[in-house]
Image (tube, helix red, strand yellow):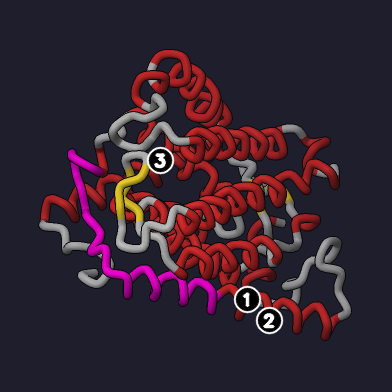
Amino acid sequence: MGFFYEVPGLMGWAIGLGVLIALMALNEFGRTTMWGGLLLYLILPIALTIYVWPTTAAPGNEYGTGNWFNWVKTYSALAGCLGFMAIRYIPSLAKNRYALAFPAFILALNIFEACLRDFQVYSYGAWDGQIIDNLWLMSGPWNIMNGIAGLLNIITICGWTGIIISKESSKDMIWPDMIWPWIIAYDIWNFAYTYNCITDHSFYCGVILLLSCTIPAFFIKKGAWLQHRAATLALWIMFVMSVPSFADRIAPVPATRDPDAFFAASFVALLANVALAVYQFKKIRKHKLHPLKDELFSDTAPYKLVMAQNR
């Protein structure tokens, strides 16, 4: 912990745990009821867009929430939540191949936005670290490494043609081919991105936020990682846009700002995504699969488990 962040005190750990529990609970509220989802991802953001964010996320504000990336990320995450709800609750969409391409598209778009931000931070030339647009940033080779890792993560998105809707009342969007190697490679890359580009906020938007979707994907509703990810991301970024002082003043967990920490996070992210790409390439070649049409992992135990739970 001390390598990446200054170790939080007891209160800091309690706040982090509280944020984690709140994100998971709200995700469950939006996941298990259609009206809960509409309230959280449609009605609430409309109200915030009109009455709150023009003030709390105004361009140039002292907390850095007014930059283009925050606004784009907010609405792309919400678009994902609402698009996934449409697929879940409109039967014809769940069987439409073009509609099933939407989850892969919005996921790739979100990753690509982050890659652009990593490359942008490198272009600032802030080699010794400096405050830019009210955010502390340090440019370095880690931005390039992690940008490449993110692009590999996009390339390895696969199997969306096999997306199904669960038979439960929650009607979850299940992506059986999105098994744990891809999820872990994504998590490592995304943590490195947050550390590179939102350094002093990354304990929450990196560590806590990633746990809030990965824990449900492994222990609450398997196969629905992307649904969990979109929901928790949307919830967190709406909160940050509304209470921008949270990570800076209310409950800060500062990063160590050690160049070795930046390098290590991005180096591991690049290795993980190279390994994932090699693994997928071998499966494609061995089984003569089409990565844009076929499911790649239908012979694996995680895939079979998810299918057995949702038939």
- Between 53 and 157, the one lying in front of the other is 53
Q: Give the residue at mark 3.
A: 236
The kind of residue on which mark 3 rests is Trp
Q: Is residue 211 visible?
A: no
Q: Is residue 213 above or below residue 49?
A: below
Q: SS for tag 3?
A: helix
Q: Is residue 132 visible?
A: yes
Instruction: Look at the magenta stretch and give its main secondary structure.
Output: helix
The region drawn magenta spans 248-272
The kind of residue on which mark 1 rests is Leu
Closer to viewer: mark 3 or mark 2 = 2
Q: Is residue 236 above or below residue 219?
A: above
How far is the residue under mark 3 from the one under mark 1?
Answer: 28 Å
Residue, x 11% and y 57% (percent of image)?
9
Picture coordinates of residue 56, whole percent (x, y) = 34, 24
| Magenta stretch contains residue 147 | no
Picture coordinates of residue 277, whole percent (x, y) = 67, 75
Mark 3 crowdedness (10 Å alpha carbons): few <14, some 14-19, many ≥20:
some
Residues tagged 3 and 2 counted as in contact (Cβ below 8 A): no
Q: SS for tag 1?
A: helix
Q: Give the residue at mark 1.
A: 276
Q: Which mark is residue 278?
A: 2
- Between 263 and 98, the one lying in front of the other is 263
